[in-house]
Amino acid sequence: MSLEYLSSADDPRVSDYTSLTDTSLRRRREPVEGMYIAESSKVLRRAVDAGHRPRSFFLAEKWLPDLQDILDRFPEVPAFVGTADILEEITGFHLHRGALAAMERPAPLDLAAVLSTARRVAVLEDIVDHTNIGAIFRSAAALQVDAVLVTPRCADPLYRRAIRVSMGTVFQVPWVRLTDWPGQLTQLRDAGFVTAALALREDSLTLDELSARRDERLALILGTEGDGLSGSTLAGVDLAVRIPMSGGVDSLNVAAASAVAFWECRP
């Protein structure tokens, strides 16, 4: 174990952890630099168990016993230790969930390989709220969704808040960032998937009608929080589907809608 005690917030060795509350900055930095931040002991353990490799740890001294076994597994990886004030000055927030780790971002998965073994996939089109991303991944892990595909403008599933809300399930559900959307609807169809968009259209099937079809392979497509799915996506899918509502409510939050749809359409 390589413990490195911090005496200043300006220490260049902890640049991975600076300004963690600046969402736009972190969104630009982390994918380009090939890293992400795992927050809390539980999330960190799930990342390591999934085979992800830490490049450093970052914690207050009181959390050392809690993570001793993890630190011992990576004796060559530095563990930066500091007072609560120094750590907060570096990150921009108070660390009350134990530890952080800067993790090496895993290599992207191949879409064809992921689709070849999947029966249920979720496609997230331009969803930008990290809380929703994390909640959708948690539902996917719990409700037999085999993979999640995210469009080019969708938020990063490995952003700190998304990981935390997902309780680390972003590490267990295979996911792929698409490069050509909605053009890759064709690839889904060629792989044998029926593509079903959750959308309020006059020709929409109800969710129970979709479920009754018992499609062998099904891709459920969920749209952004504000405008829903794009017109080009809706024009290219096989089906539109809606969740029947009562009480004067026309729709659910996208994360809640995903859980309902995943449950109803489980294989």
Image (tube, rainbow, N blue to C red):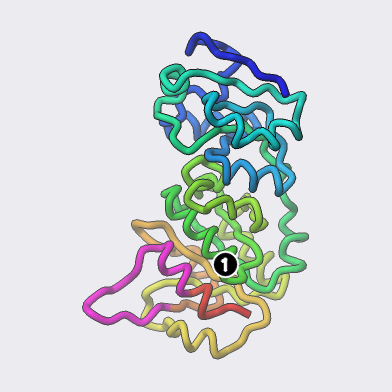
* Above or below 209: residue 185: above
Residue 153 in view (yes/no): no
Task: Give the residue displayed 43% in from the left and 55% down from the top.
Answer: 132
Residue 185 lies in the magenta stretch: no
Task: Give the residue displayed 61% in from the left and 77% down from the top.
Answer: 194
Percent position of residue 138, x then y: 53, 60
Residue 136 in view (yes/no): yes
How dense is the environment of label 1, judged by Cα within 10 Å: few (below 14), some, or many (20 and up)?
A: some
Residue 251 lies in the magenta stretch: yes
Task: Give the residue displayed 72% in from the left and 71% down from the top.
Answer: 190
* Left or right: 215 in relation to 129: right
Quarter of the rendering occupied by the C terminus: bottom right
Which residue lies under the disc numbered 1?
Answer: 142
Quarter of the rendering occupied by the N terminus: top right
Task: Give the residue displayed 54% in from the left and 58% down from the top.
Answer: 137
Q: Nearer the viewer, residue 105 or 58?
A: 58
Percent position of residue 240, x then y: 47, 77
Q: Residue furthest left?
A: 248
Q: How many numbered discs sit on the rendered protein?
A: 1
* Above or below 209: residue 92: above
User: What amino acid type is highlighted by mark number 1?
Assistant: Ala
Percent position of residue 18, x then y: 49, 22
* Left or right: 222 in relation to 226: right
Secondary element at image label 1: helix
Region of the chain picked out in magenta, as a range:
242-260
Q: Nearer the viewer, residue 47 or 174?
A: 47
* Above or below 127: residue 83: above
Percent position of residue 32, x then y: 61, 31
Q: Nearer the viewer, residue 95 or 263?
A: 95
